[in-house]
Image (cartoon, rainbow, N blue to C red):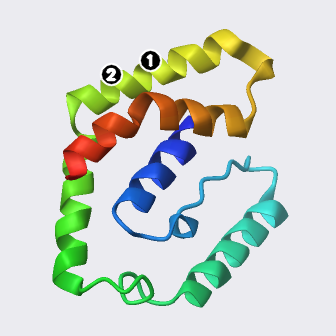
């Protein structure tokens, strides 16, 4: 769940609709669920339209933003910060909700993300 929150935060910061990302878990024994997840997500992305165009971003600008985002996820400062968020999540255990994780990512990583993408 932490990766979901981080990726969606970065996508939002670069102007890409975060609904373009979805990470779900399915075991090998859950074939019907897997098919439904893929089918629903494919439909959702098709409805959003072409990447960049649907967000009103010029292709050259989109490429620049995506490259900045790639540099960011490889940045040591972000990885260490995300590791600290993960430690906090583990300490909280079963009390952690998706909203809690989103808040932690927002609280602990916004400055790092904003500075790197500026």
Residue 116: quarter of image? top left
Q: Which structural element holds mark 1?
A: helix
Q: Which mark is residue 80?
A: 2
Q: Which structural element holds mark 2?
A: helix
- Mark 1 packing: few (<14 Cα in 10 Å), some, or many (20+)? some
Q: Residue furthest top?
A: 91
Q: Which mark is residue 75?
A: none
Residue 56: quarter of image? bottom left
Residue 7 pos. (x, y %) = 46, 50
Which residue corresponds to the image point at 64% horizontal and 80% vertical from the top-left?
44
From this view, report whether residue 22 is shown above or below residue 5: below
Asked if residue 56 can be seen in this view, the reply is yes
- Mark 2 packing: few (<14 Cα in 10 Å), some, or many (20+)? few
Residue 92 pos. (x, y %) = 70, 14
Q: Quadrant of the N terminus?
A: top right
Q: Are marks 2 and 1 in contact (CB under 8 Å)?
A: yes
Residue 18 pos. (x, y %) = 52, 64
Residue 72 pos. (x, y %) = 24, 44
Asked if residue 1 can be seen in this view, the reply is no
Which residue corresponds to the image point at 50% horizontal and 38% vertical from the top-left?
106
From this view, report whether residue 35 is shown above or below residue 114: below
For disc 1, the marked residue is: 84
Gap in angstroms between the C-alphas marked 2 and 1: 6 Å
Residue 33: quarter of image? bottom right
Which residue corresponds to the image point at 74% horizontal and 62% vertical from the top-left?
34
From this view, report whether residue 97 is shown above or below residue 33: above
From this view, report whether residue 19 is shown above or below residue 46: above
Left or right: residue 71 versus residue 17 is left
């Amino acid at each position: 769940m932490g990766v979901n929150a981080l990726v969606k935060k970065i996508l939002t910061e670069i102007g890409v609709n975060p609904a373009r990302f979805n990470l779900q878990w399915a075991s090998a024994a859950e074939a019907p669920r897997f098919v439904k997840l893929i089918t629903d997500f494919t439909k959702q992305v098709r409805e959003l339209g072409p990447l960049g165009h649907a967000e009103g971003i010029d292709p050259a600008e989109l490429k620049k933003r995506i490259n900045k985002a790639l540099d960011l996820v490889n940045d040591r400062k972000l990885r260490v910060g995300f590791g600290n968020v993960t430690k906090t999540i583990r300490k909280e255990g079963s009390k952690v909700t998706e909203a809690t994780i989103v808040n932690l990512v927002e609280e602990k990583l916004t400055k790092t993300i904003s500075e790197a993408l500026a």
